[in-house]
Every structure is written in C-alpha cells, then in structure tokens.
Amino acid sequence: MKDFRDKIAVVTGGGTGMGRELVLQLVAEGCRVAMCDVSEDNMAETKELAGGGDGVYVHVADVANEEQVDAFRDGVVDSFETEHVNLLFNNAGIGGGGEFVDGSRDEWERTFGVCWYGVYYCARAFMPLLVASAEGYIVNTSSVNGFWASLGPGVPHTAYSAAKFAVKGFTEALINDLRLNAPHVKAAVVMPGHIGTSIGINTSKVLGNNSPLEMTADEVAAVRDRWMAMGMPVGNETDDQIRQAMHQRMLDFRDKAPTTAAQAATIILDGVREDRWRILVGDDAHVLDEVVREAPELAYEPTFFERVQERGHLRGILSGNDE
C-alpha cells in the first residue's frame, strides 16, 4: 500500500495525540477516515483541523466495550456506504493499573480492557471489512512496554505492559494467519517510545481519577511516598507543591517528549508504505530494543536502566525532566 488516496481508514483514539495526527495526515493524502474516541469534543476538534466535510466520520465509542465497537463499525459502513475498509489503526490506549499486588483491580482491568480488548474487539469487528478490500492493513499500537515491561526501578507497570505484550504477540501471530487466509491483508505492530501525547491527562479522565491539581490529601501522600521511594527529594514539599509538580510532569510528558505525535504518525504511515510489520517509533525505542536484546536477563535490574540513560534516553522517567 504505497499511498492512501481514495482508501478508507479507521482510527481509534482519534481525539488527541497520535490518533489525531494519523487522522490529519491520512485526510491530507486523500483518504476517507472514520475515528472513534470517548471524547466527542476532542474528535470535533480533530475533524475541524482536518477540514471537516463528509470525508471524516466521528463516532463516540469506548473500545473496551464490544457493543460500542460494533456500533462504530456499523456507523462506518452506513456513513461511507461501504462494504470494506483498507486500514485499521488500533491506536487507543490509556495508562494506569501499575500495581497488581497492591493496587486497584478495577483500575487494572480498565487499563487492560482499553489497551488489549480495544485492539481485540476492533480487530474482530473490522476484519471482515479488511478482508473484503482489494488490499488491507491492520496496524496495532503496542509500545516499548510490549518488549520491556517497566518504567524503571521502583515503578510498577503491570496492566499496561501486560496489554502491550498481548498486542505485540497477537499482531505477530496475525502475520502468518493473514498470509494463509487473507494474503492481501497485512499486519503491523507499532512500538513507540516516549511520544508527546496527552495519555497521562486522558488516563485520569477515563479512570475517573482526580486531575493532579485536584488530588486529595491521601492521593498526594501516595504520590509523595512513591516519589520518595524512587529517590526524589520531595519529603518536605507541601501538598500543593506536589499537586503542581504532578500537573507539570503531565504537561512536560506531552510538550517535551523527544518525538512529537505528528512525527510518530509520519513514521507509522511510512512503515505501512514500506510494507513493514514491525515499526519502532523514536530513537529511544530503537535503543531500548537493542539493549533488551543484548542482555534480556538484565532487563529489570537497575544497571539496565542506567545503561539506557547513558545512551541518552529515559532520563525524564524518574526525574520528571525533559529527555
């Protein structure tokens, strides 16, 4: 699939971040695009940025809910009067659910539901439409946490990592499945590093948590304890200072990332054009992939994290500073 003109693409999580940028770049290349998200306002902004018009279909849906996903698919078919789609970008995701041993089961399962079942339900819903096309591509967003289940020492990261490993394994297994049963459809797994998105802000909203500036005293205490365990000197900070610092970290994650969402979308679309099944996004993703492969048994030791930081990456994970 060398170009996207006159193709029909489906993008989940199209309201912000990489999803928004995928929509904008696909539309700019003459592709009709259907997107879903849980935020109608964010999607309306994306559609406006894309120029509006009938070439962009918007549908509010939670990808962790199969009935809503099926309704999204039916809406795409009706809106575009089509019996096929060419591209499916399973991009939607949230964080959260870091602790399995001593964390909230509801938060864990909500995170896993969006990040894994969102991919699974959309693949189930849209696969017949991909197979009905002359050429198709399913592009599933995993993460560097799909081959390295960590954010560094002292930071539990279980739900997101488990889901992203599942997405990676599912997509790799699809390669042979599609070759045997639908050779005109390809599959690719995307593994981004630190990308400038609002995933932290969006996660709080989806999980129903307070925003950083509205955290309760107990929530602030939990953040302070976690940061102190990570070696951050915040023992004497006031509650409001902790709130402001947490808020700033989310903004910095979005605004000071080494790879922008627009750059990530370009890398993903170039990967599809080049017929690649494995798309690493960002220099940090390439370095992490290399270092994990060099010494997999050491991947969860403090020395591993230090080696990655020595290569110039992940410096902001513990300190909150820009990479």
Image (cartoon, rainbow, N blue to C red):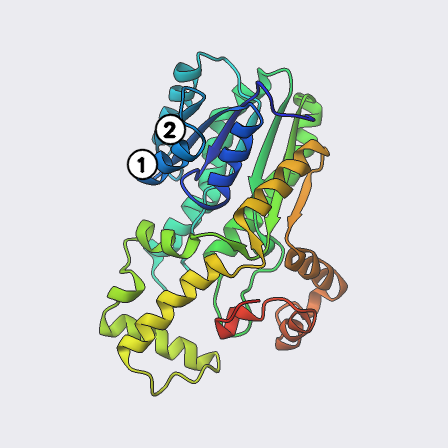
Of 309 and 121, nearer the camera is: 309
Q: Residues within 10 Å of mark 2 (few under 14, many from 20)?
A: many
Residue at the spot x=45%, y=36% of the render?
Answer: 12
In percent of width and height, residue 281 lies at 63, 49
Q: Nearer the viewer, residue 118 or 275?
A: 275
Q: Residues within 10 Å of mark 1 (few under 14, many from 20)?
A: some
Of residues 30 and 204, the one drawn nearer to the viewer in this rendering: 30
Q: Where is residue 105, by image quadrant?
A: bottom left
Residue 229 can be seen, yes or no: yes
* Left or right, 304 with reference to 53: right
Q: Residue at x 39, y 20 (%)?
A: 74
Q: Which mark is residue 7?
A: none
The kind of residue tagged 1 is Glu
Circle on res. 40: 1
Where the C terminus falls, by quadrant?
bottom right
- The residue type indicated by label 2 comes to Val
Is disc 2 in contact with disc 1, using a CB cutoff of under 8 Å? Answer: yes
Q: Position of residue 90 (x, y in %)?
A: 51, 37
Rendered residue at 45%/33% (across/down): 121
Which mark, residue 58? Answer: 2
Helix, strand or loop at disc 2? strand
Name the element at disc 1: helix
Q: Residue furthest bottom?
A: 236
Alpha carbon separation for disc pair 2 and 1: 8 Å
The answer to whether any part of residue 91 appears in the image is no
x%, y% of residue 137? 61, 28
Residue 251, compared with residue 36, is above or below; it is below
Left or right? Give the position of 52 relative to 216. right
**In this rendering, position of residue 54 left or right of residue 322:** left
Left or right, 304 with reference to 253 = right
Q: Position of residue 126 (x, y in %)?
A: 50, 25
Q: First in sequence: mark 2 or mark 1?
A: 1
